[in-house]
Amino acid sequence: MSLKFNPAASELTAEEIATLKEMRIRCARRILLSTSLAASGHPGGSLSSLDMLLVAYGLINHDPADPRMAERDRMVESIGHISPGVYSVLAENGYFTEEDFLIGFRRTGSGFPGHVESIVPGVEWDTGNLGQGLSTAVGMAHAFKIQGRKNRVFCLMGDGEQQKGQIVEAIRHAVKYKLDNLTVLIDRNKLQICGSTEDIMPQCMQKLYGGLGFNAVVVKEGHDYQALYQAMREAYRNISGVPTVLVVKTVMGKGISFMENKAKYHGSPLPADMLADALTELGVDNDFAQWQERRKEPVSTATIMLPRADYPEIQPGEPIVYAADKKTDCRSGYGNALLGLAEANNTPGEPPVITGVSCDLEGSVKMGGFHKHSPEGYLELGIQEHHAAAAAGAMSCENMVTFFSTFGSFAVSEVYNQNRLNDFNHTNLKVVATHVGLDVGEDGPTHQCIDYLGLMKNYFRFSVFIPCDPNQTDRIIRYIATQPGNHFVGMGRSKTPTITKEDGSAFYDADYVVIPGRADWLRRGADATIITYGAVTPACMEARQILKDAGKSVGVLNMASLIPLDEQAVADAAALGPIVTVEDHHADTGLGASVALTLMDKGLSPKLRRLGVKQYGGSGSPADLYKQQGLDGASIAATVQELLG
């Protein structure tokens, strides 16, 4: 059964408290049964958080018949391992049946994973890596503020996970932007996997949040429904401009005497004999054997929710064509395209649709024009890349287009795991990284991101584009803005020549259409092919000219779409003769590796040489660094000539 409170009421009635107690017994039974049936899971924290969950779902605006209604409040479970408690409460509220949950929990192919996932009706976000749920909740709350919506956000967290540094980043964001529509609930049971939180890494959560500007409230009786309701109600009605955290003192394994205050039960289910004792203590029948038999049935997929489908209709605006006789950096092409998107879609006086997030690098990533045009849509999150990536991902799921931009080393390498969770969650994030590769030059190897493609290949829902000049940058940025899903665009730092057609006009003119998985033959050749992308494309064009002067006909294939890859173009190149891949990236994990795998899969065996970064670069001009690693025009031409014999 479900229970709905009236937030206008200052306290719960005796009948409501009695109902909550009855609900708790049923939910506690499900928690114990589900974990024992699966012989794995986390019963202890589920029992300590259970009362908070029951009260919260009685308070927030939600509808089991319409789990994704636009007006719903959000409940983000950062402690995703307490899925038994979450699923038990959702079943109690009618999102699915007890049978669905108990038969399917932790079984391959079912709709009830071991950590909470949004395939479960009523679950908003896939969580598992502790310390990231607050960033997600902050991103949602900020999106609602930007859009002027009344939705509230609750975030349930553990006390052990407060040790994560990313949480401090999220706290500062919430305070800076006055997110009073956010309430953090901390299950303060003082235990984590290896024992006491005070022994493992002590801290005062009230001071942690309060010292940074939250309204920090301690709820001393975390299993007292009246105390929980009054504290949550106050936070839910908050319009002070200050976010709230409730540090709720609870008992691990609450309600089962021999489980209480024992760290062991953080992640240990009960064996059958102890389960029987626990169910007796709850005063319910022991039907473990019956459910165990039911779990021999095939799993049901009937409850599985499809990924979110909302995405705004975006106007790409008018493309900018950069003249063939003028060098421009791709990042300026990005900034101008982003401004153009804002001009085409962000109407003054209305909530912005195009939003941008950066980390103390507005000028370097060329977001200044966008910031000036749409100040309410620009988020300056400081040097907090871990949080920024996660929050931006959450924002991108609230019917807005969100660009997250910083240097490649920070946008990819540093936040690999945050982008991984965005990938799990089917976000619509546009990660645009400037300063990738040796083209960063004098900043040196710590800032020369040479692993972006190698890392991005590990995701399943990110496309990857690396443009070769500002014109192609403009078209790609406008394209990804119109498309749902996760997209990564990378570019160097330096000004680059405009790539031209044979007649000297811009190759990527106003009529060029971006098609994922399609490469562009910048020049055709009969003897060999150079396959490249990004900042080294001009050097490849130079190499082609050197070879042409030597009587060799060599094609240049620009593979700006790296995920998905144009496998047919690779096969076409193989049919012509030797292939040389050239990239400003680690030689073993980038384009060269992708081409080699494609050839192997297709059973093709042309001569192949993979040119790329073979050691960390130094601090120097890009031209010198490229020459040092054999990525200048003359070196590329020499490699092709060697293959041609």
Image (spheres, rainbow, N blue to C red):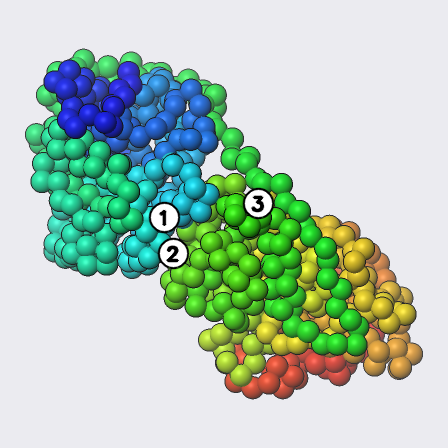
The disc placed on residue 138 is: 1
Q: Measure how far apart labels 2 and 3 are at the Cα level.
A: 20 Å
- Residue at 34% over, 28% down: 61
Are circles 1 and 3 on residues that touch, CB within 8 Å? no
- Residue at 79% over, 72% down: 324
**x, y (%) of residue 116?**
36, 36
**How dense is the environment of label 2, judged by Cα within 10 Å: few (below 14), some, or many (20 and up)?**
many
Does the image show residue 67? yes
**How dense is the environment of label 1, judged by Cα within 10 Å: few (below 14), some, or many (20 and up)?**
many
- Mark 2 / mark 3, whichever is N-terminal: 2
Closer-to-camera residue (109/90): 90
Closer-to-camera residue (630/382): 382
Closer-to-camera residue (104/503): 503
- Residue at 52% over, 45% down: 350
**x, y (%) of residue 103?**
36, 21
- Mark 1 / mark 3, whichever is N-terminal: 1
Q: Say what secondary structure mark 1 lies in.
A: helix
Q: Say what secondary structure mark 2 lies in.
A: helix
Indicate whether 612 appears above or below 289: below
Mark 2 lies on residue:
387
Indicate whether 346 appears above or below 578: above
User: Which three-letter amino acid code belongs to the residue tagged 1?
Assistant: Val
The quadrant where residue 167 appears = bottom left
